[in-house]
Image: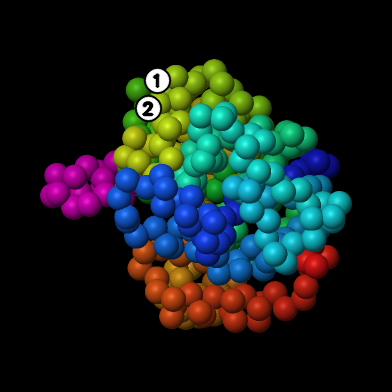
Amino acid sequence: MEKNIDLVYLWVDGNDPKWQEKKRRYMDTEINTVGRYQDNQELKYSLRSVEKHLPWIRKIFIVTDDQIPAFLDTNHPKIEVVFHSEIFPKEVIPSFNSSLIEYFIYKIPGLSEHFLYANDDMFVNADLEPSFFFKDGIPIMRMLYNPLIRYKIKLKKALNINVNTYRLAIENAYTLFKKRFGLFYPVSQHHNIDAFLKSDYKAVVEEVFKEELETMFLNRFRHKTDIHRMLINYYALANKRGILKYADRKESCRLRVHRTNYQKYISKYDPQLFCLNDSEHATDFHRSHVEPFLKKIFPVKATFEK
């Protein structure tokens, strides 16, 4: 069993006026990205879930754009806030593109070889051992079985149906990998906490796909040329440094913020992990349901809070 396993979060407070002004300065056109950056206090409750159910986590790194969550006790020995400027090349800053930001988390000083990666809208709902995420030191990579993923995107394009930049980034990743290695994995993300090896990140970013990834470095916002981090999953699986596991809803359940009957899904599936996925479909009315729901499930303050 691995003793040193860290957890990395990406976090942004999209309600911060200074951050909003910075974003406006770099946006060419005004598009609806509220759901992507909205802070519904999820991080507070995600941390509560981690302290309750994953007490063995060694260190928690929170990667932010010069922001610090107001509730967070930064003096806690397990917590470290990492600013983008500490891990990004200067020419990349500022970046509002999570697809890009994810490729630099392996550069966090002191990050363990075995680590978990999460967004702030991901929660642990059961006591889990390190063996849930790693087997004999190899990451267990939970994915959704999706054999038609290639054809769904191609069909949408053929019918002139809009394909969002996130799905295009996934297509770019598997197309690039298949071209280089002749392998295709019929999977899509399970939208929850993922396990990785830092050395795989480093190999993909600095060696195997260095030139291809550098082409997206100046995509400050999500762009159709982005390459999804599933590239690292593909690389690990192909090199027997990852164990593919198809996740079901009892392991990993994705809830959507704009469908506010959250408890119905929790009661039905009792998932070990769940995600509360915000999007452009959600309104402030929908988002007003998030914190009351999370407070009921995770009522006890974490030691990470002031």
Q: Secondary structure at mark 1?
A: helix
Residue 138's disc is none
Q: Residue at x 45, y 51 (%)?
A: 23
Which residue is disc 2 drawn over? Answer: 176
As drawn, the residue found furthest toward the left would be 159
| 130 falls in the magenta region | no
Give the quarter of the image for residue 41: bottom right
Q: Position of residue 139 (x, y in %)?
A: 64, 39
Which image quadrant is residue 266 in?
A: bottom right
* Rendered view: 68 above or below 153: below
155 within the magenta span: yes
Q: Residues within 10 Å of mark 2 (few under 14, many from 20)?
A: some
Q: Foreground: 246 or 252? A: 252
Q: Are marks 2 and 1 in contact (CB under 8 Å)?
A: yes
Which residues are drawn in magenta?
A: 150-166
Label 2 sits on what residue type?
Answer: Leu
- The image quadrant that residue 201 belongs to is top right
